[in-house]
Image (cartoon, rainbow, N blue to C red):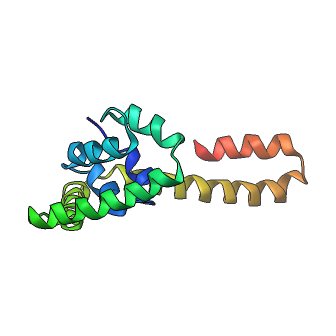
């Protein structure tokens, strides 16, 4: 079951359950939340039930969060340490990936080409827009 989408939605009301939903304890957190909302413990059912949540159910979600926190302490599970470890692991694996850096560099180069093109075009064309666009495309080549 993938509860990652619900993490932000529920995290505002019940941060501990929201954090658990995005991690390895998502199934357990989903069952707790589904029990309060009276629906199946699937992401779609929880999302549908969450659209029509009542103030009483919100209070029950807060109570369930406190029970969930107590259960996590009893099991000696630190959800925030798990989330931090997950982010550090992602940074370690993707720090050598050049995709984001390449896209950023290409965007900067295109921006510089655009600014240069507009400067050159404004000097030579005297506000003729058709020439500006052709200069832009020629400068990209």
Looking at the rendering, which quadrant does residue 83 occupy? bottom left
In the rendered image, residue 10, in percent from the top left (x then y), is placed at 41, 53
Residue at the image position 70 percent from the left and 54 percent from the top: 117
Q: Quadrant of the N terminus?
A: top left
Residue depicted at x 45% and y 50%: 57
Residue 87 seen in the current view: no
The picture places residue 2, in percent across and down from the top left corner, at 29, 38
Task: Please indicate whether residue 15 sits to the left or right of residue 51 in the image.
Answer: left
- Side of 1 where 61 appears, left or right: right
Which of the pair 111/34 is nearer the observer?
A: 34
In the picture as drawn, the residue positioned furthest to the left comes out as 75
Front-most of 67 and 14?
67
User: In front here: 57 or 98?
Assistant: 57
Q: Is residue 11 rendered to the left or right of residue 130?
A: left
Residue at the front extreme? 56
Residue plotted at (40% across, 42% down): 37
User: Residue 3: where, in percent of width, then height?
Assistant: 32, 42
């Amino acid at each position: 079951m993938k509860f990652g989408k619900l993490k932000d939605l529920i995290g505002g009301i019940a941060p501990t359950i929201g954090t658990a939903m995005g991690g390895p304890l998502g199934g357990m957190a989903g069952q707790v939340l589904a029990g309060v909302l009276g629906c199946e413990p699937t992401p779609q059912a929880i999302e549908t039930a969450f659209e029509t949540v009542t103030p009483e159910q919100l209070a029950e979600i807060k109570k369930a969060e406190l029970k969930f926190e107590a259960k996590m302490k009893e099991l000696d599970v630190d959800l925030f340490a798990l989330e931090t470890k997950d982010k550090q692991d992602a940074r370690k694996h993707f720090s050598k990936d050049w995709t984001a850096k390449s896209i950023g560099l290409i965007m900067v180069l295109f921006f510089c080409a655009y600014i240069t093109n507009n400067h050159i075009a404004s000097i030579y064309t005297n506000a003729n827009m058709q020439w500006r666009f052709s200069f832009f495309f020629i400068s990209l080549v």
